[in-house]
Amino acid sequence: TGTPRRSLRGLGALLLWMLTLAAAPAYAQVDLRVLVNDAPDPVQTGAPVDYSIAVSNLGITTATQVDATVFFSAALTPVAQGTPGWTCVTTSVTSCTLDTGSLVGGANAPTLSLRFTAPSTPQTVQVTVSATAAETDANPANNTNIQQTTQVQAAVADLSLTASANAPTASVG
C-alpha cells in the first residue's frame, strides 16, 4: 500500500514541474526589440539624414533567422544601406538580414545604419522598422518602432553682408 502513494506523489511532483514549465514567464523565450534614432532632426531639404537601428534579443532563448525590414516614406531617397554585420537589399523597402543569422538571448545585434536624402520640399517623413525571427516572439509589441520622424525644413540662407567705404583723403597744403 505504501508504494502506490509514493508513485502518486512522484507523479504529482512531475505534473507540478510540467505545469511550472508551461507557465514560464515570457522572457524565457525570444523577445526582439527595435529602437530607432535619427540625426539630424530636424533636417534641411535635400540634406542627408541617418537612421541608427538597434535590434536586441531581450529573451534568454536564441533568435534565429533575424531580419529587419525598414519601411520609409516615398519622399526619402536611399543613399547608403547597411552596415557591417547586416546584408541589406533596397527596393520600395529595405530588407536586412543579420549576417550571423542568430542573436543569443540578452545580446544586441550590430547597429544597423541607413542613410537617406531628405525630400526637396518641407514635409514630415517617417521610417518604420520591424524585426522578426523564426521563433515566436514573447512580446511582439516591441518588435516595431514607428516613432522616429524627421521634420524636413527648407534650407535657410546663411548670408552676411559687410559694407565698408573708403573715405577720400584730403590734404591741406
Image (cartoon, rainbow, N blue to C red):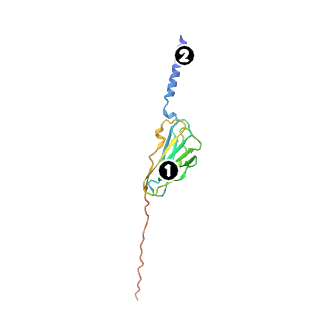
| 157 versus 108 height, above or below | below
**In the depicted view, which residue is nearer to us: 92 or 12?**
92
Numbered tag placed on residue 16 in the rendering: none
Q: Residue furthest right?
A: 100
User: Residue at left 48%, top 38%?
Assistant: 140
The Cα–Cα distance between marks 2 and 1, rounded to whole angstroms, is: 61 Å
Q: Is residue 172 left or right of residue 25?
A: left
Report the residue at 51% width, 42% height from top: 131
Location of residue 108 in the rendering, given as x and y in whole percent from the top left corner: 54, 42
Q: Residue furthest bottom?
A: 173
Question: Toward the viewer: 91 or 46?
Answer: 91
Residue marked by disc 1: 51
- The one of 162 and 46 positioned closer to us in this rendering: 46
SS label for mark 2: helix
Label 2 environment density (alpha carbons within 10 Å; few <14, some 14–19, many ≥20): few
Whole-percent x and y of residue 149?
44, 50
Which amino acid type is marked by label 1?
Answer: Tyr
User: Which residue lies at the image location 51% right of the left edge and 22% below the top edge?
Assistant: 15
Instruction: Quickly name the residue at label 2.
Output: 7
The local secondary structure at tag 1 comes to: strand
